[in-house]
Amino acid sequence: MRYLTKSDFNKMEKIFRINLINSCTGYKSANLIGTKSKSGIENLAVFSSVTHLGSNPAVLGYILRPTTVPRNTYKNIKETGFFTVNHITESIIEDAHHTSAKYHEDISEFDKTKLISEYKDNWTAPYVKGSPVQIGCKYLNDYFIKENGTILVVASMETLYFNDELITEDGWLRLDKENVVTINGCDGYALPKLINRFEFQRPK
Ligand SMILES: Cc1cc2nc3c(=O)[nH]c(=O)nc-3n(C[C@H](O)[C@H](O)[C@H](O)COP(=O)(O)O)c2cc1C
């Protein structure tokens, strides 16, 4: 096996290090976060750090990169308090990935891709039409992570839409039925395949 230490990381070429460190922690969630600015401009961007923080209350979070450059999603969330989380499926990975391009805040990624915004239930932030799992989120708080200048954004899950066929009797969403993808590193998209589910475990 290849063996590296922190001193090797420090000596690496930048892109090589980004790829290595981003992929070595494992597969990540693949989501598009939809927002709308106070002045009404829609924004859409891909994020691989959205994660469940708790079920009761239903809370999720995502990690925002350092705000040393404009971060439109974050700005819109702070301005309006609302955003949506939309799962990425196999058929939209190219467009989803393109939303990571640094567009000016006046330009909507919905206009630069084939992705279509969808409004429902008076939710002010746009959902991504056709995404099989869509979550309407309300900003709660953010936490600056001083060790590397990132920010943990925490939000409550206020609405949840999912395609009927995904849910099982016990409430579990079987994401592979809709070809929901996962992210490997910062530019690899993969399709997970369910192996099995297991019962709640107790000590033997
Ligand atoms: C696969 C992938 C995953 C990403 N995940 C994150 C993430 O978790 N957090 C983050 O701040 N940026 C992430 N980005 C970068 C944003 O998509 C990128 O900065 C985008 O321009 C943000 O758009 P905005 O300024 O409109 O918010 C990711 C990019 C890619 C390609």
Image (spheres, rainbow, N blue to C red):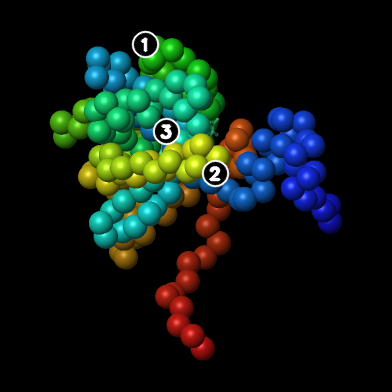
Left or right of 43 on screen, residue 138:
left
Question: In which image quadrant can residue 13 be found?
Answer: top right
Label 1 secondary element: loop
Residue matched to label 2: 147
Left or right of 34 on screen, residue 122:
left
Q: In the rendered structure, which amino acid carries the disc numbered 1? A: Asp
Residue 66 percent coordinates (x, y): 50, 32
Viewer-side residue, 6 vs 56: 6
Badge 3 or badge 2: first in the primary sequence: 3
Left or right of 42 on screen, residue 189:
right
Q: In the rendered structure, which amino acid carries the disc numbered 2? A: Glu
Question: Can you tell which of label 3 and label 2 is closer to the viewer?
Answer: 2
Q: In the rendered structure, which amino acid carries the disc numbered 3? A: Leu
**Mark 2 closeness class: few <14, some 14–19, many ≥20 residues within 10 Å:** few
Q: CA distance from mark 2 to mark 1?
A: 32 Å
Mark 3 and ligand 1: say if the CB distance to the nearest ligand atom is below 8 Å. no
Viewer-side residue, 3 vs 170: 3
Question: Looking at the image, which residue is at 29% across and 20% down?
Answer: 37
Visible in this render: residue 49? no
**Mark 3 closeness class: few <14, some 14–19, many ≥20 residues within 10 Å:** many
Question: In which image quadrant can residue 105 be found?
Answer: top left
Question: Can you tell which of label 2 and label 1 is closer to the viewer?
Answer: 2
Badge 1 or badge 3: first in the primary sequence: 3
Label 3 secondary element: strand
Residue matched to label 1: 106
Label 2 secondary element: loop
Badge 2 or badge 1: first in the primary sequence: 1
Q: Residue furthest left?
A: 122
Residues at circles 2 and 1 in contact by the CB criterion of under 8 Å: no
The quadrant the N terminus occupies is bottom right
